Amino acid sequence: MNSPLKEKLLRLREYIIYFMLDAAKQSLGISPSMNGVYFGHPRKGHTTAAFLKARSLAELLGNKSLRNAILYVCSGHIPLWYCLREKKRGIKLVVNQNGVYYQGWYGASYVAANERHLLGHYRAADYIIYQSAFCEESARRFLGEPPCPHQLLHNPVDTAFFTPETGHVFDPAAPVFLATGNFYSEVKEERIRLMLEAFTLVRSQLPKAQLIIAGYVAPQLARITAAPGGGMRFTGSYTYAQAPTLYRQGDIYLNTQFNDNCPSAVLEAMSCGLPVVHLACGGTPELVGETGIAVAVEKSWEQFVYPTPQQYAEAMLEAIRKRDTLSSAARKRCLERFDILLWKRRHEEIFRKVRG
């Protein structure tokens, strides 16, 4: 996570870049190209999901900042004023819509946040890509009916990079549970507590069980992570390059995020052969299908209603019993539905349609 100050400086730098780009297009009188797509100025290193997605597409399909016919925006990562200037030049705007602000997640100021960050791009779009059926449902509810053609396209996973460990033999008496995430504030505390308490219940039956939690944990959550219980480890942040090795340390993946939109980490775990224990809400069930174990929860936009540790522990035990069958099914589902090359081809089809 970038600090607020660093994020503001990055935004300022990008504003200057788009201002210069806009000026160059005006002075040179550049008209739309028939083939080019601009995915925005790429951010390097660790950044948000929106910038990562744009960077991935730019690497797959090229990035044409001047000679473009299409401008591709992920969750408002390109300033609205620049998008509107491009539309005046005849550029088509494709919006990849990933979730909205709502009370249960953002609090009472969610309406203003939607208007400030998302609504302008949504209304200006010439084509909308929803990352999940849940994203479409939430957008219709909080942003309004789509103003243009649209379709559903889930996030991808590089199945050639995220692969299962060769020759791994699962020991049901000593399962290794893995969870990853960005636990950046107290808001995430309940997610961690649910995992820890559920794991404690599982370990009371399986003393050799282990739990690995990887990712950034905010300093204010140190009271939870400073003295983990038996079999628990917090391993800290990791890079994308390190992720496959991390996933291969686990047998079963745990996701306790409420209303997760379309989590790439879930797909990465599945591609590595890990069944996923998850909450039956948001976009996660669309990804996992029958290859994991869902824990029933009450659907809500106003508050996050988590299951009890006992309910989640029961799902973890069920995943142990079915692990080998679910593991192969999870990998197969990623290969058939979510491979990054399939995602690339779907985008190429969309761009042909948008160009007309």
Image (cartoon, helix red, strand yellow):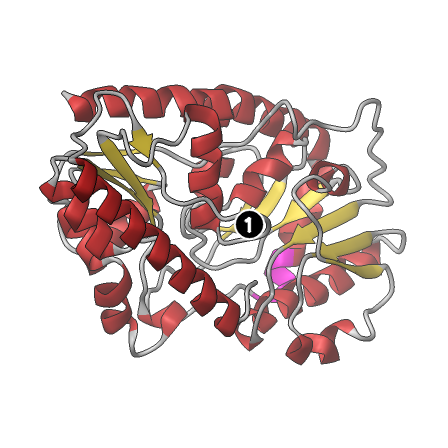
| Highlighted range, magenta | 308-312
15 left or right, relative to 173 = left
Relative to 343, does residue 137 appear above or below in the rendering?
A: below
The amino acid on which the numbered mark 1 sits, given as a three-letter code, is: His
Residue 78: in sight, yes or no? no
309 left or right, relative to 344 = right
* Residue in the foreground of this view, choosing between 60 and 103: 60
**Quarter location, residue 291:** top right
* Residue that appears at 55% across and 37% down: 267
Residue assigned mark 1: 278
Q: Residues within 10 Å of mark 1 (few under 14, many from 20)?
A: many
| Placement of the N terminus among the 4 image quadrants | bottom right
Question: x, y percentage for residue 303?
Answer: 39, 71
How would you classify the magenta stretch by its main secondary structure?
A: helix
Question: x, y percentage for residue 134?
Answer: 33, 47
The residue furthest front is 27
Question: Residue 34 colored magenta?
Answer: no
Question: x, y percentage for residue 302?
Answer: 33, 71
Relative to 170, does residue 246 appear above or below in the rendering?
A: below
Name the element at disc 1.
strand
* Residue that appears at 23% across and 55% down: 80
Residue 82: in sight, yes or no? yes
